[in-house]
């Protein structure tokens, strides 16, 4: 019985291969976008975890100097003698590779080299002969060293003995941090008395990079979900149509003696098999998408957060299983309504295909109520939402509410227009378009979401770009930036530059913690550069005067929002209290920043001397200046970067940051275009009975084909009109709510009418292209097929 | 007795209130017997046929088929009855459009677990469907489709064949051919036949005739 029924059910798909293709392709595309994003996220998280495992980051308490500088090796000896079980760590960069030096005899288990695949020689490691542990990718960059391949090692990181690391990094006698082992002996000396210049950083149960990048990954996930949602519209449409067409068959099956429960189980199983097949195809496509996106994501994470990502993509169960799960789950959600209707369908109702329009009419009221509730909720949340969850709830209610409202809005517009129609053809056209609306509504909803996402995201990115470029102009005011290697070079540079430049601006900072937020504090010099160029978002009276006098500080917007600090609040640094005199925009920086005067900085952090300098000068004199500087001090031009180069690098990072977003945007729009094509193609097969009367009454097949094309373009145009305000609302929510929660800064919103017009044209073109084939097929429908409509033979 | 229907009542809820379609109908049918059920539109013929076929349940009364009261069966029990004991020929054919003619003919017998390919071949041959076996229903004429539907019903050799105006969609000549074939094959299988029809001529070809009027046997 089961076999015969399955054969009958499956035969529907073989007889309607286009429908099967739509279902599989829609689901595969939706899964691909989701799985691709998840693969990128999983790879990044695995990299963070590997880094955390290698360095013990977040797992153990650590001792570091309060001013963020390395400590003397004697400090380690002092602590060990006083009974403290601590283990030293040195780290730095060598030819782009992060070198981590550990002391294997005292390091806690799990830190350092993990599970090498090639035989590591522990004697070589212990005797400091220069053996490194790294993954194959990193090992290739350390060709001159003996490297033991360790697949689980953090990307871009090599672990070695602390003595070797100190020698290679030029940190002889220095230690960056001390890992505090969990079980300490009793009766040891007080840390504050023993090493007063050290501070204890408690374990945080996760990596800092992991937390810093959470927002970035959440954004990617949200986009993946949006793409999946657009894809699921296709699946929903395909399943809905297939079930609609099979309702008579289901009645027949039941009339012939198949229990309802078995029909539903078999139809559900059939869909789950398709979901599994499409899911596997989607995961494979997702792998390709992830492999294409990964280099840009890696560059973004390195540029923004300093996080190293493995360049190779692994088939991690976490993402391919989630891809399959979402394919099955999405299909279950898309099919649940259709299966429910099959379950409720009376056996003896007229065995006619139920008109889509009638069904849509019954659903319209529920849909309208739901849309009103969701749009109302989003309206309230626009004024109240804060935080990422609130932001994404706002976006979801706005998008879903608008999508649900779209068919109703279009129906009202079409009803109004049809009332104005004068000619009989126009009247038929508008009435027929209204009748087509239910069948096309899912595809149009997908187009609405894709277009609104495009308008919203492009507005956000373009607004961000404008703000960021302005910001770079303000912040990168110096014409030349020079990095020195030591204090002697710094002195030589200052002596040489003083008579040849308008101002020398030392760039010196210490890594500190303000109200639990990792922060860089900068000591700055007074020349007019800062006053003239920096834009303050909030300020007290004379903020620069009081800051350079050492009484106040300025903080960036991220720190202000995350720590809840504003103008007038006080912050204590090294025992000195500073009032906050201003808050400045600091776009692109993931952590907090504070600015104090140069003199007070030198007093609070005497160990820190500037090794980076900004030089104000006539831009035309920069090349000569560099030549003369090398001749006078031996400093090569490679130690200098001019303003234009830094801006180009910064903008490069910015552009790559949004490459992924743009790629997902384009893919989402492509999926929506595919949805329209498939809906039109599928509907075209059902259109003959509706078009035959018009043909019989005098419209030519060619005219009918042209009207079909016009209908698709007109519906896409109306959808685009609705998508524009929705997209702008989306942009506002992204800029004013999501960005603030994710990155800590609020951006002004700019409008880009030319971009929207171009996007609208693309959407119309996509709709026209999608409609071309079905319209052509209808225009070439043989008269015999049209005649069948009027005979009993059909 | 193959079929005994006793005091059957059925009421439907309509926009104007409850409407009693059947108000206490009795009938009997023996194996090999043919019975025509006639009556005006709305007299309850199709409803009675549906109740006997286990497609619906009566509000009151008993329907015994081979001594089994089908009125008390649950959904699964009625489905099993339709699979194995009763065969229904519908006015609208109700073929499965995505299956070829040969698969449509074999379908119900396969559901019932009584598939006999040789009998399928005989049925197709007798119905003149052999050249059409690889075609899909949409490629057949109305008469051919109804012959496929009859062949499908007879393929599992049901004890009782129910036909709801099986020739209602066919022209006179085709209707006669189809009915002749159905009567011939029913007779050969020894099944009982209960046929709803408007046609006095068709009813006259049955061994008995029962006329319904306003939900009662006239």
Image (cartoon, rainbow, N blue to C red):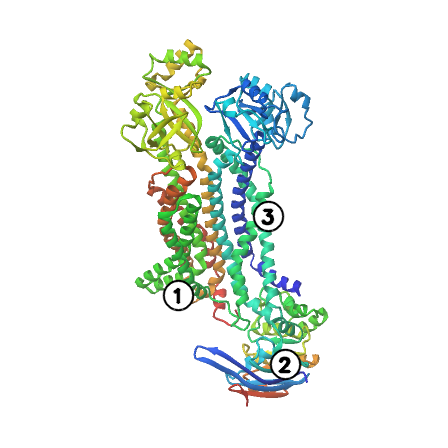
Q: Which residue is mark 2?
A: B180
- The CA distance from mark 3 to mark 1 is 50 Å
- Tell me which residue sits at (35%, 60%) in the image: A412
- The CA distance from mark 1 to mark 2 is 44 Å
Image mark 2: chain: B
- Tell me which residue sits at (54%, 76%) in the image: B169
Q: Label 2 near label 3: C-beta < 8 Å?
A: no
Q: Label 1 near label 3: C-beta < 8 Å?
A: no
Task: Tell us which disc is closer to us: 1 or 2.
Answer: 2
Residue furthest out toward the bottom: B218
Q: Secondary structure at mark 2?
A: helix
Number of the label disc, if any, that sits on residue A280: 3
- Tell me which residue sits at (39%, 28%) in the image: A572
The foreground one among A617 and A356 is: A617
Task: Tell us which disc is closer to us: 3 or 1.
Answer: 3
Name above or below for residue B181 compared with residue A214: below
Q: Quadrant of residue A640?
A: top left
Image mark 1: chain: A
Q: Secondary structure at mark 1?
A: loop
User: Where residue B139 sits: x, y (%)?
Assistant: 57, 67
Q: Quadrant of residue A744?
A: top left
User: Where residue A612 sits: x, y (%)?
Assistant: 42, 20
Q: Classify mark 1: residues with Cα within 10 Å, few (<14), some (14-19) or many (20+).
A: few
Q: Which residue is mark 1?
A: A698
Image mark 3: chain: A
Q: Classify mark 3: residues with Cα within 10 Å, few (<14), some (14-19) or many (20+).
A: many
Name above or below for residue A666 compared with residue B167: above
């Amino acid at each position: 019985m089961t076999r015969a029924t399955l054969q009958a059910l499956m035969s529907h798909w073989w007889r309607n291969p286009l429908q099967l293709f739509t279902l599989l392709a829609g689901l595969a595309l939706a899964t691909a976008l989701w799985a691709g994003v998840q693969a990128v996220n999983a790879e990044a998280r695995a990299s963070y975890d590997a880094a955390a495992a290698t360095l013990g980051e977040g797992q153990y308490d650590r001792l570091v100097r309060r001013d963020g500088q390395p400590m003397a090796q004697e400090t380690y000896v002092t602590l060990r003698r006083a009974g403290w079980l601590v283990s030293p760590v040195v780290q730095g960069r060598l030819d782009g590779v992060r070198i981590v030096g550990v002391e294997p005899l005292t390091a806690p288990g799990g830190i350092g080299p993990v599970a090498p695949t090639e035989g590591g020689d522990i004697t070589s490691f212990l005797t400091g002969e220069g053996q490194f542990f790294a993954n194959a990718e990193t090992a290739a960059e350390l060709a001159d060293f003996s490297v033991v391949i360790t697949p689980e090692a953090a990307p871009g990181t090599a672990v070695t003995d602390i003595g070797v690391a100190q020698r290679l990094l030029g940190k002889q006698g220095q230690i960056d941090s001390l890992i505090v082992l969990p079980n300490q002996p009793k009766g040891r000396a007080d840390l504050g008395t023993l090493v007063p210049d050290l501070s204890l950083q408690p374990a945080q149960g996760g990596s800092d990079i992991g937390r810093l990048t959470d927002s970035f990954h959440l954004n990617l996930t949200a986009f993946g979900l949006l793409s999946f949602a657009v894809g699921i519209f296709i699946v929903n449409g395909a399943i809905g149509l297939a079930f609609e067409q099979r309702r008579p068959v289901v009645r027949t099956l039941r009339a012939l003696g198949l229990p309802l429960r078995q029909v539903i189980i078999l139809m559900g199983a059939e869909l789950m098999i398709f979901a599994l097949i499409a899911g596997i195809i989607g995961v494979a496509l997702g792998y390709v998408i992830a492999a294409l996106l990964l280099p840009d994501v890696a560059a973004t994470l390195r540029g923004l957060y300093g996080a190293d990502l493995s360049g190779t993509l692994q088939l991690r169960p976490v993402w391919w299983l989630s891809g399959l799960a979402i394919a099955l789950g999405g299909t279950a959600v898309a099919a649940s309504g259709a299966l429910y209707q099959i379950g409720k369908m009376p056996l003896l109702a007229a065995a006619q295909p139920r008109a889509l329009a009638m069904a849509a009419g019954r659903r319209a009221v529920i849909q309208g109520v739901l849309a009103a509730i969701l749009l109302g909720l989003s309206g309230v949340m626009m004024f109240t939402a804060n935080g990422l969850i609130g932001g994404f709830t706002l976006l979801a209610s706005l998008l879903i509410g608008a999508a649900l409202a779209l068919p109703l809005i279009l129906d009202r517009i079409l009803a109004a227009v049809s009332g104005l129609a004068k000619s009989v053809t126009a009247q038929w056209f508008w009435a027929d378009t209204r009748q087509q609306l239910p069948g096309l509504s899912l595809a149009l909803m997908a187009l609405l979401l894709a277009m609104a996402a495009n308008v919203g995201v492009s507005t956000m990115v373009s607004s961000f770009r404008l703000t960021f470029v302005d910001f770079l102009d303000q912040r990168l005011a110096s014409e030349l930036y020079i990095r020195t290697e030591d204090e002697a070079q710094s002195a030589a540079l200052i002596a040489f530059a003083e008579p040849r430049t308008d101002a020398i601006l030392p760039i010196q900072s210490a890594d500190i913690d303000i109200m639990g937020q990792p922060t860089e504090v900068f000591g700055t010099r007074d020349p007019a550069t800062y006053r003239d160029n920096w834009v303050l978002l909030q300020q007290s009276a004379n903020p620069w005067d009081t800051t350079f006098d050492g009484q106040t500080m300025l903080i960036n917007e991220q720190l202000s929002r995350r720590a809840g600090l504003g103008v007038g609040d006080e912050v204590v640094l090294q025992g000195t209290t500073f009032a906050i005199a201003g808050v400045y925009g600091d776009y692109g920086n993931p952590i907090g920043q504070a600015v104090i005067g140069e003199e007070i900085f030198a007093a609070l952090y005497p160990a820190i001397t500037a090794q980076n300098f900004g030089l104000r000068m006539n831009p035309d004199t920069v090349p000569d200046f560099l030549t003369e500087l090398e001749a006078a001090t031996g400093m090569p031009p490679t130690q200098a970067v001019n303003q234009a180069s830094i801006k180009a690098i910064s903008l490069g990072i910015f552009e790559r940051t949004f490459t992924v977003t743009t790629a997902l945007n384009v893919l989402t729009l492509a999926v929506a275009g595919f949805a329209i094509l498939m809906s039109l193609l599928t509907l075209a097969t059902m259109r003959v009975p509706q078009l035959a009367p018009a043909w019989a009454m005098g419209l030519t097949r060619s005219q009918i084909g042209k009207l079909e094309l016009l209908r698709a373009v007109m519906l896409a145009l109306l959808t685009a009109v609705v998508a524009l305000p929705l997209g702008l609302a989306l942009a506002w929510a992204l800029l004013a709510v999501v960005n603030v929660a994710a990155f800590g800064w609020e951006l002004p919103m700019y409008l880009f009418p030319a971009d929207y017009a171009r996007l609208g044209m693309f959407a119309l073109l996509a709709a026209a292209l999608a409609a071309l084939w079905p319209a052509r097929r209808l225009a070439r429908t043989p008269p015999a097929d049209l005649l069948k409509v009027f005979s009993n033979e059909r | 007795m193959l079929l005994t229907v006793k005091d059957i009542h059925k009421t439907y809820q309509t926009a104007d209130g409850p409407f009693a379609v059947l108000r206490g109908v009795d009938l009997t049918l023996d194996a090999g017997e043919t019975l025509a059920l006639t009556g005006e539109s709305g007299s309850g013929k199709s409803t009675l046929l549906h109740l006997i076929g286990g497609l619906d349940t009566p509000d009151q009364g008993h329907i015994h088929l081979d001594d089994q009261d089908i009125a008390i069966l649950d959904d699964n029990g009625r489905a099993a009855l339709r699979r194995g004991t009763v065969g229904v020929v519908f006015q609208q054919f109700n073929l499965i459009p995505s299956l070829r003619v040969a698969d449509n003919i074999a379908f119900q017998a396969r559901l019932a677990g009584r598939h006999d390919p040789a009998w399928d071949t005989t049925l197709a041959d007798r119905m003149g469907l052999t050249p059409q076996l690889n075609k899909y229903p949409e490629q057949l004429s109305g008469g051919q489709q109804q012959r496929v539907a009859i062949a499908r019903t007879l393929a599992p050799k049901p004890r009782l064949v129910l036909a709801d105006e099986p020739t209602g969609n066919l022209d006179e000549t085709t209707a006669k051919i189809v009915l002749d074939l159905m009567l011939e094959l029913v007779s050969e299988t020894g099944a009982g036949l209960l046929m709803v029809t408007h046609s006095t001529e068709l009813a006259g070809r049955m061994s008995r005739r029962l006329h319904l009027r306003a939900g009662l046997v006239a």
